[in-house]
Amino acid sequence: MQENRIKQRVVGGVVLLALAIIFIPMVLDFRKDYDQVINGTNIPPKPKDFRIETFELNQTAQVKVPRLAAEGSVEEKLQQHELVKQKQAADAAVAKVEAKPAKEVAAVKQSAPVKAQHEGWTVQVGSFSSEKNAQGLRDRIAQRGFPAFVDSVNVKGRLSHRVRIGPEADKQQANRLKQKLQKEMGLKGLVIWHQQ
C-alpha cells in the first residue's frame, strides 16, 4: 500500500514539474509583449512616378427603345379587355340572380362588382391564380359594403387575379380602409397605388 502512495506522489510531482516547465515561460513571455511599444508603420512609401489619370466622358448614351405595338392596337386591346371584364361581371351577376329567390335580389345587386376608378390608393387583400376564387372573395367583401373589384394582370407569363378594395383619393383613407377591413373581416392587406 505504501508503495502505491509513493508512486502516486512521484507521478503527481512529475506532472506538476512538467506543467510548471510549460506554463511559466509562457506567462513570463506574455508579460514582455505588453512592454513593447510600436513607433513605426510598415506602410511602404509612395512611389515617385505615381500618377492619376482622369478622362472626360463627353459621349452621351443613346438607347434605342423598340416600338412594341402601335398606339391604336394598345387602345383596342384595352377596350377588348374592358369588354371582357364587363361581360364576365354581368354573367356572374345574372347567374347569382337566377340561383336565388326573388326576395334576395336586392342583396345580390349590392354584391355586384364595383367598377374601379382609373387611379387612386387601393388595399390589395389577395392574389389568386383562379378567377373563381378571386371573385368569391370579392363578393364576400362586397356583401359587407366595401367597394371591391378584381384586377387581372399577367405576371411572369401567368394570369393573376388580384382582389382590391377602393380606390381612395389619398393614402391615409386607404390605410383607414385597411384597418377597418382587418377589424371587421380579419383580412390583412397591402396599401398600393392603383392605376388603370
Image (tube, helix red, strand yellow):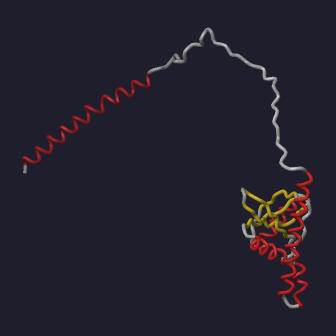
Q: Viewer-proximal residue, 125 or 39?
A: 125
Q: Is residue 180 above or below residue 100?
A: above
Which residue of the protein is positioned furthest toward the top in this rendering? Answer: 48
Picture quadrant of residue 195: bottom right
Image-based side of 131 in relation to 30, left or right? right
Instruction: Please determine whether, in this image, residue 11 is positioned above or below residue 189.
Output: above
Q: Considering depth in this image, is 29 or 1 the residue closer to the camera?
A: 29
Residue 163 spot, x, y in % from top left: 79, 67
Coordinates of residue 48 in the picture (x, y in percent): 61, 8
Residue placed most toward the observer, 73 or 195? 73
Where does residue 24 sit, x and y in percent of width and height?
30, 31
* Quarter of the image with the C terminus in it: bottom right
Image location (x, y in percent) of residue 172: 86, 59
Q: Residue at x 18, y 37 (%)?
A: 14
Residue at (75, 63) in percent of width and height? 160
Identified at 82% across, 76% down, the residue is 139
